[in-house]
Amino acid sequence: MNKAKAFKTSDYLKSNEDRAEYLKAIMAENDEGMLMLAIREIIDSIGGIGKLAKETGLARESLYRTFSKTGNPTYNTLFKVLDNIGLQLSVSAK
């Protein structure tokens, strides 16, 4: 019997442009929990939390907690992670 492979968003986030568009779509939902999980998916798409921890010097356990549904990253952590994954935040008028 053929088993279907589980869908993982991170499998489809191949470029920084893909990741940016995904994050924009999630941000439009205005749900903090979804945003943290989306960033986690992006982290997974570039090698995972362990790789990110090594590259940023941030604690792996802390990154797992920070980018969970109830995560609440500091400004510094968020910008360090976004920089590492090839993204940046911007602001525009409504």
Image (cartoon, rainbow, N blue to C red):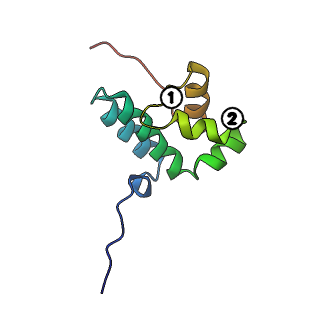
Q: CA distance from mark 1 to mark 2?
A: 18 Å
- x and y, in percent, of residue 32 in the image: 37, 28
Q: Residue furthest bottom?
A: 1
What residue does disc 1 label? Answer: 88
Residue plotted at (44% across, 53% down): 10
Where residue 49 appears, as percent x and y from the top left, is 60, 46
Q: Residue furthest top?
A: 93
**Image check: 36 left or right of 75?**
left
Q: Which residue occupies the foreground of this view, 83 or 67?
A: 67
Residue 9, numbered circle: none
Q: Residue at x 31, y 83 (%)?
A: 2
Using the image as rendered, state which of residue 85 and residue 38 is in the foreground: 38
User: How many neighbours does mark 2 have within 10 angstroms: few (below 14), some (14-19), or many (20 or more)?
Assistant: some
Any part of residue 58 in sight: yes
Give the camera-side residue of 70 and 31: 70
Instruction: Please say whether residue 85 is visible from this viewpoint.
Output: no
In this view of the protein, which residue sits in the foreground, 52 or 33? 33
Q: Nearer the viewer, mark 1 or mark 2?
A: 2
Which element type, helix, strand or loop, lies under badge 2? loop
Quarter holding residue 58: top right
How far across and how far down the image is residue 57, in percent? 73, 36
Image position of 27 with respect to 92: above or below? below
Q: Earlier in the sequence, mark 1 or mark 2?
A: 2
**Amino acid of disc 2:** Leu
Looking at the image, residue 49 lies above or below residue 6: above
Q: Amino acid at mark 1?
A: Gln
Q: Give the class, few, some or many, for how many residues have Cα within 10 Å of label 1's Cα (few <14, many ≥20).
A: few
Which residue is drawn at the image coordinates 36% and 36% (left, top)? 34
Q: Quadrant of the C terminus?
A: top left
The residue singled out by tag 2 in the image is 58
